[in-house]
Amino acid sequence: MPSEEAVPAEKHGPTVYSFFLFFSTGTLFCDTFEYMTFILIDAYLCNSCGTCIEICPEVFRLDEATGKAALVSTEPVITEAVYQAAAFCPEKCIEITET
């Protein structure tokens, strides 16, 4: 029976995982694929408190038109500060997903 182990190869931006399958015969199978990480902001839930901007100003900003949280760029670098901003958001309107 093979054993399976996921090894993250990269921490920022697209996350690359390599799966290694070790078979009882001693053969090794390696397959690599990529996950894309997305930040979703629910503007309806956002109360414009600015917590995300204080924690991670390189990724989040207040939209001038709506006064709600928005992304600085369309392809932000996902850092630990982004995860902290999502965790400390009082309205929980920031979602980080991997596809």
Image: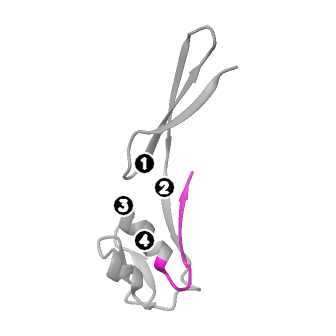
The residue nearer to you, when weighing 44 against 83, is 83
Q: Magenta segment: does it hold 89?
A: yes
Coordinates of residue 96 in the picture (x, y in percent): 52, 64
Q: Nearer the viewer, mark 1 or mark 4?
A: 4
Q: CA distance from mark 1 to mark 4?
A: 18 Å
| Rendered view: 2 above or below 99 | above
Residue highlighted by disc 2: 37
Kind of element beneath mark 3: loop
Q: Mark 2 vs mark 4: which is more N-terminal?
A: 2
Q: Residue at x 36, y 52 (%)?
A: 12
Q: Which residue is mark 4?
A: 84
Tag 3 residue:
79
- Give the percent coordinates (x, y) of residue 28: 53, 15
Label 2 with label 1: CB-CB less than 8 Å:
yes
Q: CA distance from mark 3 to mark 2?
A: 11 Å
Label 3 crowd (10 A; few <14 / some 14-19 / many >=20): few
Q: Is residue 60 above or below residue 75?
A: below
Sequence-wise, the earlier of marks 3 and 4 is 3
The colour scheme applied to this rendered structure is: one colour
Per the model, the C-alpha gap separating discs 2 and 4 is 15 Å
The residue depicted at 35 percent of the width and 81 percent of the height is 53
What is the span of residues highlighted in magenta in the rendered image? 88-99
For marks 3 and 2, the one nearer the N-term is: 2
Among the 4 quarters of the image, the one containing residue 51 = bottom left
